[in-house]
Image: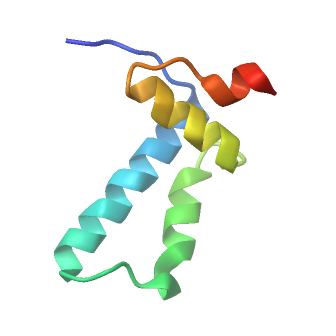
Amino acid sequence: MQNFTVTDRERDTVLAALRYYQFYRMQGHPFDPRQDHLIDTIAGQTGEALDLTEIDDLCAGLAGNPHALALSA
């Protein structure tokens, strides 16, 4: 089992992604873009939502890889 630590902002993004996936599965079709504000609200619960580079780094970290984009910036 892998253990990892995430910041509050990263946790909010993971929760938003899970809610997005849950809603997608419940609808049986692609997510309704008219409801995107709900995802942004969850992702930014504790402050500013992660930007695209931070999301990519979080995905890499969750997959057990170094945060390559952060290292090259």
Question: Does 47 appear above or below 63?
Answer: below
Give the image quarter of residue 70: top right
The image shows residue 19, relative to residue 35, as above or below, that is: above
Query: What residue is rendered at 72% in x and 19% in y?
Result: 71
| Residue 18, percent from left and from top | 33, 52
Q: Tell me the quarter of the image containing the N terminus.
A: top left
Left or right: residue 16 compared with residue 18: right
Answer whether residue 25 is visible to the viewer in this image.
Answer: yes
Q: Which of the 4 image quadrants contains residue 26?
A: bottom left
User: Closer to the camera, 22 or 45?
Assistant: 22
Question: How far across and how far down the image is residue 44, in percent?
Answer: 62, 52
Quadrant occupied by the C terminus:
top right
| Residue lying farthest to the right in this orientation | 73
Q: How many marks?
A: 0
Q: Is residue 69 left or right of residue 28?
A: right
The structure residue drawn at horizontal position 51% and vertical position 43%, both measured from the top left corner, is: 12
Apparent side of residue 55 relative to residue 70 in the rendered image (left or right): left
In this view of the protein, can residue 50 be seen by the observer? no
Q: Choose between 61 and 21: the one closer to the eye.
A: 61
For the point 43% across and 43% down, which residue is it? 14
In the image, is 7 to the left or to the right of 5? right
> Residue 22 appears at what percent x and percent y?
25, 63
- Rendered position, 55 above or below 68: below
Q: Residue at x 57, y 62 (%)?
A: 41
Colour style of the rendered protein structure: rainbow
